[in-house]
Amino acid sequence: MAHIRVLILNNYPMDRVIREVSLGETPDQALFGVNRLQEYGFEPIFLPYPAIGRWSKFQKLLSRLRIPLELGDLQQQMMALQLSSQADLVYAPCGSQTHLLQYLRAFGLYKVPIVTLMHHSFLKGKLDFLRNWQRNLFIRGADKLPCLSQALMDELRGIGANHTKLALLEWGTDVKFYGPWQPPGSGVIATGRTGRDFLTFAKAMAQSRCHGTVIGLQGQLDNPIFHTNSNVNIIEARNEQPAPGENRGWLKYPELCQHMQSHGAIAIPLFAQRNLAGLTSLMDVLGLGRAVLMTRNRHIDIDIEAEGIGFWLEPGDVDGWVQRLNWVQDHPGEIFVMGKRAREMAEGKYESHKFASQLVELLKSAPYVA
């Protein structure tokens, strides 16, 4: 049986991440299943990112003109059009890349089926009425729109997505990457790059009896409170892309995991969210087996309180953070149990191999021509 050829369009370089995974520098969940496609009879064809050429220059011009037109990555998509005769499917692990292809497919002008993994809601703005028709075309032009959260799936259904296109995929952790479970240390650590409200966390730490660490990028932690609070250890990483096998860029996962393992709980403080911010760090919580304190986000499907692995906080709630930080300090036995329970979740339902197998079944259900 011939392999099913799949064009992969993504918003970061998959070849770099594949190299990082092979070197043990990154857990394989960052590949969103593409590293296992060959095991199931697919042949992935990776398109470069960033894709540089005349279309990328044209797109920069459009962005300067501030035209409310969502086109995805034009250069990548033009390459995909050129490779259409060599492809049976398009898989976009991120929903930011394939707008133009989906518009063309909605009009019957692009024949290759498209599966787009949706992480976030559509952006809202003042000119939203000018974008609604684009979103309808985006939905019509996708053959499958798997979602990483139930809330997002409900939103897409509410704006016209047919239920046959929608599916919920539960992201999972690369358990082997995190190694054998280790008992928790002490204190609370906050890390992450997207939507982080480190200031609320630092204010709460200053008023609590708990000690901990904040790991952020240079420029994120300039407020004086981060540098005058004896309860908080600050680690600032260089704000640049890492390179596989080289010691540059932001902290690599093995070093980051060492810091997280040395603490009793992981904090995920967020600003009020309309997107899936925090899910990557929640995967670290499960993989490492740690208790978690997290700002409530309706796009996160794992109910950390119902699962008994942590507590929800409200956005900007300094007093609530103080209370929970003190609770962590005073209940090491419960923190131990929460961490064990989180790891058991990673070894069971939330495991990256299971995500990949769910993805494969969905790709096989797309109307490709073998």
Image (cartoon, rainbow, N blue to C red):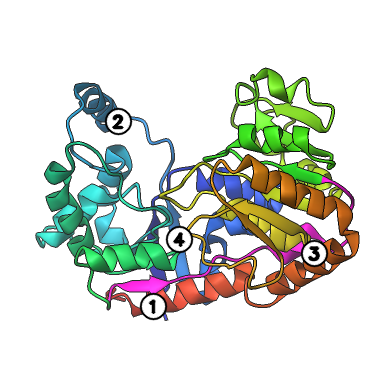
* Mark in the foreground, 3 or 2: 3
**Decide: marks 3, 1 in contact (CB < 8 A)?**
no
Q: CA distance from mark 4 to mark 2?
A: 23 Å
Which quadrant of the rendered structure holds the N terminus?
Answer: bottom left
**Amino acid type of the residue that numbered disc 1 sits on in the rendered structure:** Lys
Which residue in the structure is indicated by mark 1? 364
| 45 or 367: nearer the viewer | 367
Q: CA distance from mark 4 to mark 1?
A: 14 Å
Instruction: Give the left or right position of residue 159, taking residue 196 as reference.
Output: left
Number of residues whose C-alpha sits closer than 10 Å to that of mark 1, classed few (under 14), some (14–19) or many (20 or more): few
Q: Position of residue 164 (x, y in %)?
A: 27, 78
Tell me if residue 2 can be seen: no
Left or right, residue 201 beside residue 368: right
Q: Residue placed at 39% from the left, 51% from the top?
A: 9
**Label 4 sits on what residue type?**
Pro
Q: Are marks 4 and 2 in contact (CB under 8 Å)?
A: no
Mark on residue 56? 2
Callout in the foreground (3, 1)? 3
Q: Residue 68 lies in magenta, yes or no?
A: no
As drawn, 358 above or below 198:
below
Number of numbered discs on residues: 4
Q: How much space separates mark 2 and mark 1, taking CA atoms?
A: 32 Å
Alpha carbons under labels 3 and 4: distance apart: 36 Å
Mark 3–mark 2 CB contact (< 8 Å): no
The residues tagged by marks 3 and 1 sit, at their Cα atoms, a distance apart of 36 Å
Disc 3 residue type (three-letter) = Gly
Q: Nearer the viewer, mark 4 or mark 1?
A: 1
Nearer the observer, disc 3 or disc 4?
Answer: 3
Q: For the residue labelled by badge 4, is the local secondary structure a helix, a strand or a loop?
A: strand
Is residue 346 or residue 18 the one in the foreground? 346
Q: Earlier in the sequence, mark 3 or mark 4?
A: 4
Find the magenta span and give its range: 164-187
